[in-house]
Image: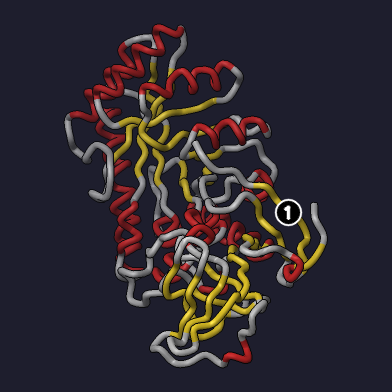
Amino acid sequence: MSAGTLPLLETPALVLDRPKVQRNLARMRGKLAGLGVPLRPHVKTAKCIEVVRMALEDRPGPITVSTLKEAEQFFAHGLTDILYAVGIAPGKLDHVADLRRRGADVKILLDNVDAARAVAAKGEALGLRFPALIEIDSDGHRSGVKPGDAALTDIGRVLQAGKGAELRGVLTHAGDSYNCGDTAAIRAMAERERLAVVGCAGQLRAAGLPCPVVSVGSTPTATFAERLDGVTEVRTGVYMFFDLVMAGLGVCAVDDIAVSVLTSVIGHQRDKGWIITDAGWMALSRDRGTAAQTIDQGYGVVCDADGRVIDGLLVASTNQEHGILAYRGGSAPDWARFPVGAQLRVLPNHACATSAQHDRYHVVDGDSRVAATWPRFSGW
C-alpha cells in the first residue's frame, strides 16, 4: 500500500483507475450472466493478483493464461483452475507436469497431430495425463484447425488413445473481431465464432470422442454476442481495462479506459508545435493498433493530470524515452498550459502492451490520490 498523490510520482508511471476497473468488470459479468455462460477471465492484461481477485470476486478461479509464468504466479496465490491458451511447445511439458503435480489443474492447447502425439508420449513417460483442448480457427486470423477438417477427429483420437493425454474440449479466439468495421460486423463475428466451436464439438462427439468444454473468447465478441447456445465458457481479458482500440471498435467509451501513463513535460519545439515528454515507447509501447481504424490515435490520447481528455492532443511520435505530443491537424498548443514540469496522462492504444512496460500500478479512485501500489509482473 502507498499513500500520496500523482504529482509526487517520478514519471513515467502507470496509473490504474479502480472505479473504472470495477465498472468494466461488472459490465462483463452482467453481460455473460444474461447469456447464461460463465466467464474464465484472461489474466494476461492485468498480470496482477489484486486486479484478478477483483475480476474473480475472490473465487479461486477459473482463469486463462498466456504464459506459464502467469500460471506460476497465480497458482502461488491459490488459483488452481488454469487454462494455458497458447499452443503448447513440447519443451514446456515438464513445466506443465510440475505444476500439475503441485496441485494446479493446468489445461493445455494444441492444433495438430504432431503436438498431440508429443503430449501423449510425454504424459505416458511421466506417468500422468495432460488434459488438452483443440484450438479451432474460427476466422482465419491465426492458428487452429478449420471447422469441418478431418484432422480434428484425428487429433482427438490421438489424445484419447493412450494414458498420457485426454481430450478436454475445443477452444477458439475470434481475433479478427479486432478488424471489424462496426458493431454489426462484431455481432456477426461472435455468431461465427460460436458456430465454429459448437460445430466442432458436435463433430468430435459424433466420432465418439468427449468434448465437455466449448470455449470462446475475445472482448469484442463477448461484448456483442447475442446468443451463446452450446458454449460452456467465455474467455476475455482486456475488458478489465479497455483501451483506444476497443473504443475505436465501439466496444467501450474512451472514458471507460482504466489505465494510463503519467508523464511530465520536459521541453518544447515551438516551431514544430511539439510538446516533449518523458514517456517514449519504453513507457507506452510501440503499438499502433488504431492506425487501421477510422480515427488514428497516434501513440495515445493525451489527458490532463486528472485524466480528462485534452481534445485533439495526441502522442504523435515516440523515441525510446521521449514522447512527442502534437495537436491533430497541426494547430499550435497554448504553451502556457503545458509548462516544463506539467504532468499529463496518456491513454494507450493497447492496454496489454502498455502495461507490460511497467512493474506496478499506481491505483487511484477517480482522483489524484494514490490509494495503493499494486505490483505486476512480466516475462515468460
Q: Residues within 10 Å of mark 1 (few under 14, many from 20)?
A: some
Q: How is the image coloured?
A: secondary structure
- Could you say where residue 218 lies in the image, as x and y percent from the top left? 41, 52
* Residue 187 appearing in the image: no
Q: Nearer the viewer, residue 107 or 314?
A: 314
Q: Is residue 63 above or below residue 237?
A: above
Task: Please give the name of the residue rendered at 27% of the width and 50% of the height, measured from the top-left corner.
Answer: 141
Left or right, 220 with reference to 307: left
89 left or right, relative to 49: left
Q: Quadrant of residue 43?
A: top right
| Quarter of the view holding residue 370 | bottom right
Seen at 50% across and 51% down, the residue is 237
| Residue appearing at x 35%, y 56% in the figure | 190
Amino acid type, mark 1: Thr
Residue 56 position (above or below residue 274)? above
Residue situated in front as seen by the camera: 218 or 234: 218
Q: Position of residue 374 (x, y in %)?
A: 70, 50
Snapshot quadrant of residue 134: top left
For the image, the number of numbered tags is 1
Name the residue carrying label 1. Answer: 373
| Tag 1 secondary structure | strand
Q: Residue furthest right?
A: 3
118 or 189: nearer the viewer: 118
Q: Position of residue 378 (x, y in %)?
A: 55, 43
**Above or below for 326 versus 38:** below
Taking 378 as reference, is 330 left or right? left
- Residue 109 seen: yes
Q: Residue placed at 54% from the left, 18% from the top? A: 98
Q: Is residue 128 left or right of residue 157?
A: right
Residue 345 in percent (x, y) is at 60, 72
